[in-house]
Image: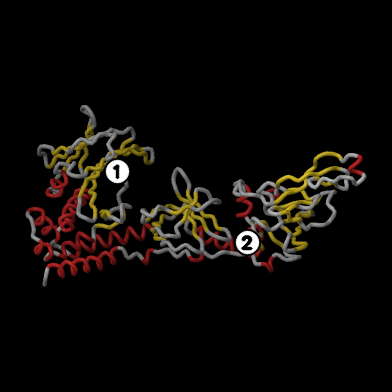
Amino acid sequence: MNTKYTLVALIFSLFALITTAQDYQQCERDYSNLQQAVKTLPEEVVPGSEIFLSEAYLQSIEDGYFKGIPSGMKHWNYVRPASRKELRNENESSSELMGNDGNIYGLITTPSNVHFFRPTEVFEGEYLPQWKDPEMIIPLGLMPVNILQYHNRLFVVKEKRDEYIVLEVGGNTLVFYPGLPKTELVFDSEKVLNRIAEKQNIASTLLGGQFIVTNSANLHYRTRSVGLDHSLDASIDRLTIKVKDVVANRRETLLAYGEEETFYLVIDEESDFVLLEKGCVMDQQREVALRAQQEAPKAQENLNELLEKEFSQAELESKVWLMQVLQGRFQLKSNGKSGEGTYEYIFIDEKEDFVTCLKPQLDENGELGLLSCYTSEKGLYHTKIEVSIDGEEPIVSRRIPTLNEKSSRKRNDGQIVELIHFTDGDDMGIIKAIAQNADKPIMVSYVAGGSFFEEVELDIVYKEAIRDAYLYSIFLKK
């Protein structure tokens, strides 16, 4: 069998393993019952029907969603008492009208958040508006109403036409002119409210849950519950969220997440992302890692052998099972750089993201780096590390200045997290030394300027992660 065919077979067997390792179908949370749009049907807004203002519409008004949107309407507003000439019906101004109360009214633009009007004593009983392109002129005697005062009030439809809807609420008459927004977005029938309540109850089962969300063309979020949708950066293949609130309305369901700032994940009829329960995924990953170890009892012996000598291409190909063991310990993720991927080690016991430790950084081409993470309340400003193995002389990394792009600081839960990315040989042989001595005590000193340093013992899980990444890089490069 030629080498090319052997490599194809090797890649195919690894693809099968990857598919198995990342097949989390049983962890998927079905959210289809949260996608359904609940619509107020035309037959539910007819004379005699009882309706309510929708929560989504009221929230839009309260949040100022309509500000900046052209109103498209003008209404008549009091200007002054009529003069004697005007009282003799000699007023010829087209921009002013005299009311039956003897006062002059002029046209002003209706605020964009006003869609309801109330009749006053000047109103003469004709609700039909006038059109003067591009605006609609509301009849004289109808004045704007702050609709927020009618929250949770029952409306009875008295008259419905294409141009307007007359409603009664608490003994008062109001007129609504369809346009922006449309009638079906403003009103809720009792049937609609019951269906929204059902959606809210279903959504509430997600409260407090932690989920992994896969990116897709229809994965949208907002910075507030009412506003414009934003698409997630295409380079991000997934995000992890903890649901801290849920908002269900007629068109969609919103999942609130985030720590310092709240974001809203949008679930609507177009959503096609996958929602995975994080706990289930972690259990699956642990099973994959444990199964890989159990199925190859001599894996450690072979890993040590591989560390001690150089293997030829043919010898490596004969150890496909060993590569499969290593493959089961990593998960390939996109790093957003022209489709390139990074292998992330699967810890059997879930570790915090920013504990003090050393972690391997392995890309899909086999290039290996080291991440130094130091976490404390006050910080250290460390610029290099020194690694002592079983009491031997320490191996010292290159110094990476704090202003270098490979060095960064951030805050996490009240702690200062210092990160240094050692790449292109910056580790000065530390990775290989740890890999070859993963079974021995290893001390790591995080060194700052002067004589400031902090020494900790490297946890076995990180020693094994570095060892496995070093070995896996050998296979990937071959």
Quadrant location, the N terminus: bottom left
Residue 394 location, quadrant: top left
Coordinates of residue 460 in the picture (x, y in percent): 20, 48
Above or below 90: residue 246: below
Q: Residue at x 40, y 57 (%)?
A: 213
Residue that extends furthest to the left in the rendered view of this protein: 309
**SS class, disc 1:** loop
Above or below 252: residue 105: above
Label 2 neighbour load within 10 Å: few <14, some 14-19, many 20+: some
Q: Are marks 1 and 2 in contact (CB under 8 Å)?
A: no
In-image side of 143 versus 217 (left or right): right
Label 1 neighbour load within 10 Å: few <14, some 14-19, many 20+: few
In-image side of 275 versus 463 (left or right): right
Q: Residue at x 41, y 62 (%)?
A: 274
**SS class, disc 2:** helix
Residue at mark 2: 193
State the CA–CA distance, disc 1 to disc 2: 48 Å
Residue at mark 1: 355
Residue that extends furthest to the bottom in the rendered view of this protein: 1
